[in-house]
Image (spheres, helix red, strand yellow):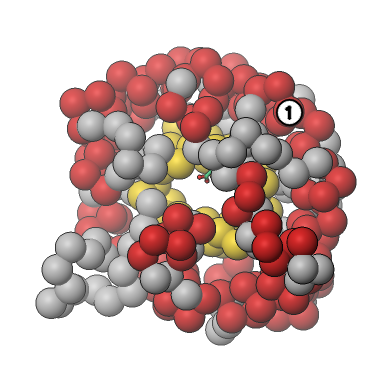
Amino acid sequence: MSRKKIIAGNWKMNVKPSETAALVKGVAEATAAAAGRVDVVCCTPAIDVPAAVAAAAGTGVEIGAENCHWEDHGAFTGEISTGMLLDAGAKYVIVGHSERRQYFGETDETVNRRARAAIAAGLTAIVCIGETLEERDAGRLQEVIRRQVNVGLKDVSAADCARLVIAYEPVWAIGTGRTATPDQAQEAHALIRSTLAALVGAETAETVRIQYGGSMKPGNAADLLAKKDIDGGLIGGASLKAADFAGIVAAAAV
Ligand code: PEP
């Protein structure tokens, strides 16, 4: 089955509101040739979302956020609800990034709550999973991936999968310059898809896009994206330079 590729930038905590329009417009211009053939998304700090949405208007670029809470509103100081993100014009939200798991106590259970809230609200959730180097070296890759999919996507229905993207991000490859080989990534993606198939059915699992993330760059994107189950990329460092990001989008557009 052919799945439209999706390249999403994760700006992390890097771009100020006053710098946002220039980067979004730069991305839109540099990726214009791929418009319609590849889904191009910039996931920005929540405070940048309104400026990013305004700058992306009329272009092929869509805007997402980097996290959301599971409640609609209430006494949750410092949190951002899915309704707030939608109201600001976001279409996507990253959930369960390894930096949230590592530094902010995110668990598979809270990832599940956030993902279900995002999908129920009408956002597309980009749910991140991936093993640490210790887990890989200990031969626990399969166990960790299966647990993260089974718990993180618990009670996500086949219908919900229309608004689900999964990002496989081996923690050891994020921001390290060390990339999983295309074969290592494909092995994990195939495992994710078969684990998902047991939850929502094989036919639906075939429709869900699985991105690779971890030091993806213009120079290595084509080999990764050529693999059967690699349907795009979640891009950290290289999303902060329009030309680099566009190089990855171009590799996805072939
Ligand atoms: C990420 O943080 O999602 C990521 C993949 O980062 P980088 O591309 O910098 O490794």
Q: Which amino acid does the dot numbered 1 rest on?
A: Asn
Q: Which residue is found at the position 43% from the left and 27% from the top?
A: 240
Q: How many marks?
A: 1
Residues packed near mark 1 inside 10 Å, few (<14), some (14 to 19) or many (20 plus): some
Answer with left or right where residue 155 lies relative to residue 18.
right
Q: Residue at x 70, y 39 (%)?
A: 179
Outermost residue, bottom side: 155
Position of the C terminus, as image quadrant, is: top right
Question: Can you give x and y, in whole percent of width and height, for residue 197 in the image?
Answer: 77, 74
Instruction: Please indicate whether residue 227 sits to the left or right of residue 102 in the image.
Output: right
Residue annotated with mark 1? 220
Residue 26 spot, x, y in % from top left: 41, 17
Q: Residue at x 77, y 37 (%)?
A: 224
129 sits left or right of 198 in the view: left
User: Quadrant for ligand 1?
Assistant: top right
Residue 57 visible: no
Please tell me in which quadrant of the rendered image residue 13 appears: top left
Residue 99 % position (x, y): 45, 55
Note whether 199 is above or below 18 in the view shown: below
Using the image, determine if residue 127 lies above or below residue 200: above
Residue at 54%, 61% in the rendered image: 127
